[in-house]
Amino acid sequence: MRYAILPLLFFLCGLSCRPALKNSLNSEAPVSEYLIAYNVLVDPEQDNYDIFTMNPDGSGKRNITNNPDVAWVYQAEGNRLFFLSDRDTSRRMYQLFIMGPGGENPGRFCHIRMADSWFGSRKNGTELIVKPHDSFDRFLYLIDDKGSVLQRIDPGTPYCTNPTFSPDGQTIAFNGKNKRSKREPGYREEIFTIQTDGTGLKQLSHYPENDTTAEWFEYRAGPPRWHPGGEFISFQSKQDGKYSLYAVAANGERQWKLLDTQWQEGYHSWSPDGKWLAVELFDAGETQFHIGLVNWESRELNILTDTAYRFQQGPVFVKRK
């Protein structure tokens, strides 16, 4: 939800090679049963973010919130969009809301003050794993479809954000941090996993010790997104002076660069079948943010957005109906 403070190589998977990414503006329309929802800064002076949707070929762009608040979609389950908003509260004091894919019936899902954090769902969206605001609790919360807290889960790290469930719902991946603040000397953030009962804490990602190109406020390990196949977790990381998507095996035994485009690569989501990757793309000067769509089999990249807005971020897939 921030202004993203946030050439071509081959992708290696085991011993097999995948084709390099190709840019395209005229791909055949993919995943037609889904829309892509994403976040747009529509009024910088008023700090007004709205949620837009579009078809997977980039057509049909539509503002579905049209509200003078900060609204940011972080998760979709079927045809439901879960988003944070500071409407009816104070600036950047977020609560969790839910609505349909066209913005239908928006309503508060939970009255707990939430951290500015990604979150995940399981059991067809009847349970969510969320991060409450640190002033409220440092633990992760498992909540039900009524917004009630079912379980508090100690992450086992001094601070945590961006929890998400594995595809089978048994494991939680999150950003674990060894300090309470990025400004503290020795601050590190990595991808960790933990079981839903709070046991089995394991660090998966390892930022290169000799890489000093990420500033204190930039991601060394950004929000984790579990591939639907369950084999790996993807995340953004600034390495060698550039934001790229990386992946780490679910058992932590291997880490690799997932994408290498001409763009900086940021927030992203996988289609439920794992065949498509929606990704936020931006230039080094952060003058323009786009949403791109990658066909994961062919590695073709299609830029979906135009320059009507500067900040277009955080895509997720949602069913049309």
Image (cartoon, helix red, strand yellow):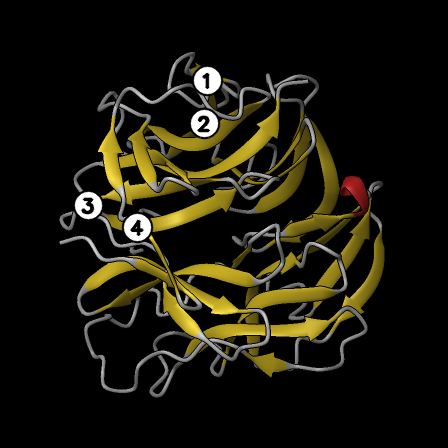
Which element is circle 1 on? strand
x then y, percent, for residue 243: 26, 58
- For disc 4, the marked residue is 265
How far is mark 3 from mark 1, CA to CA?
23 Å
- For disc 1, the marked residue is 63
How far is mark 2 from mark 1, CA to CA?
7 Å
Between residue 177 and residue 170, name the one nearer to us.
Answer: 170
Q: Amino acid at mark 1?
A: Asn
Between residue 313 and residue 59, name the one nearer to us.
Answer: 59
Q: Between tags 1 and 4, which lies in front?
A: 4
How far is mark 4 from mark 2, CA to CA?
21 Å
Query: Which tag, 2 or 1, sits closer to the chain's start?
Result: 2
- In the picture as drawn, the residue positioned furthest to the front comes out as 16
Q: Which residue is pictured at 24% across the width and 43% down the height?
A: 282
Query: Which tag, 1 or 4, sits closer to the chain's start?
Result: 1
Whether label 2 touches label 1, CB < 8 Å? yes
Q: Which residue is pictured at 52% across the width and 62% down the height?
A: 233
Task: Give the crowd class for mark 2: few <14, some 14-19, many >=20 residues within 10 Å.
Answer: many
Mark linked to residue 50: 2
How far is mark 1 from mark 4, CA to CA?
24 Å
Which element is circle 4 on? strand
Q: Is residue 119 visible?
A: yes
Image quadrant in which the C terminus is located: top right
Between residue 53 and residue 230, name the one nearer to us.
Answer: 230
Whether label 4 touches label 2, CB < 8 Å? no
Which element is circle 3 on? loop
x then y, percent, for residue 190: 46, 75
User: Compared with residue 63, is residue 163 higher up or lower down, i.e. above or below?
Assistant: below
x then y, percent, for residue 127: 79, 49
Task: Give the crowd class for mark 4: few <14, some 14-19, many >=20 residues within 10 Å.
Answer: many
- For disc 3, the marked residue is 286
